[in-house]
Amino acid sequence: MSTERYLFPAHGPNEGAIRQALTLAVQIQQQAGENTDIVVLTHDKGSLTPSTVNWNGLGDAVSKALSKGQTIPLPGGGHIRHETMRSYRSTSFRGIVLALHPEKKMLNAVDAARLAQAVIVVPWLRDDVAEWVSTWQPAIPGQPTPTAPPHVQNSVVSVALEHLTGSINLSTGLGHPLDHASAVHLFRLLKKHGEDFDPAEVRAWAVTHSWHPNAADDLEDVAAKVLAGKRLKVAREASYGTDYIEMLRKEAKERSTEPK
């Protein structure tokens, strides 16, 4: 199951956008089934007030209860509750996340919910979610669905990232010294042989290919440092043979000629 992602563009305290997002969350919940929950995620408890969530499907009493942190049953099954960054446990959540005024840390937590039915984002500022929007190309209700370009423009780099992903322990990302070394040597190899890569593109590719968002941040950081020529300590010498870059190029070329 792939996670549906939606964006309600907003600027500042836009309660109308939040109510529209709540309406969509409940619609998705009703279609998904009785065991689907909705989490309204904010930075802290004070971020959610009765007026903020006074959606016409909840009513004043329910809105006040929700703003106080109570779990509210929904018609037809499922529940809606308010959580903060301190209480939210993303990895096991299978419901719908409504993220209000998120920034990078919250969006990383949201993206870590690989099993979520849907993610709905209402930003405070569009710049706060620019990276997330570029990565996922979320649907904006009322607008045509965007066509997402490939995250990595260089097909050789894309193939290289696939091989790296298959060779490391994704549960720890680059936490193991040998996995970190593999990433460093890979980007050094690509740079040495003139294969251009963009660290932001690398992160976007990683987070959409099963990397934990924090691990994708680490990968972006390694790519940026290698690109800038900075020295990085590694646990071992280069493990890629001189013919590895040619193997990557050959595989990329073969894929480009495959029937679509």
Image (tube, rainbow, N blue to C red):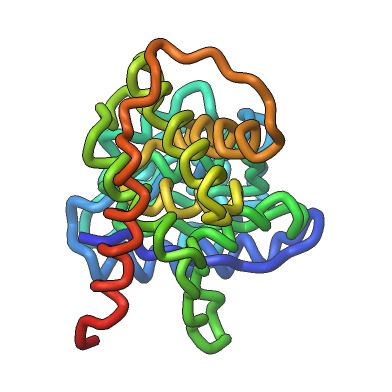
Q: Is 15 left or right of 204, judged from the image as shown?
A: right
Residue nearer the viewer, 49 or 122: 122
Residue nearer the viewer, 194 or 54: 194
Residue 120: where, in percent of width, then height? 49, 59
Residue nearer the viewer, 165 or 8: 165
- Which residue is at a point 39% across and 53% down the rendered structure image? 208
Judge whether 27 appears above or below 113 on screen. Answer: below
Residue at the limit of the structure toward the right, as seen here: 12
Judge whether 12 appears above or below 67 on screen. Answer: below
Q: Could you say which quadrant of the image residue 111 lies in?
A: top left
Quadrant for the N terminus in the image: bottom left
Q: Is 189 left or right of 91, judged from the image as shown?
A: right
- Which residue is at a point 65% across and 54% down the rendered structure image? 129
Residue nearer the viewer, 44 or 231: 231
- Which residue is at a point 79% across and 61% down the rendered structure image? 11
Residue 44: where, in percent of width, then height? 63, 29
Tell me if residue 41 can be seen: yes
How many marks the image carries: the answer is 0
Residue 103: where, in percent of width, then height? 66, 42
Quadrant for the C terminus in the image: bottom left
Tell me if residue 65 can be seen: no
- Which residue is at a point 21% across and 81% down the rendered structure image? 258
Residue 100: where, in percent of width, then height? 61, 48
Residue at the limit of the structure toward the front, as seen here: 242
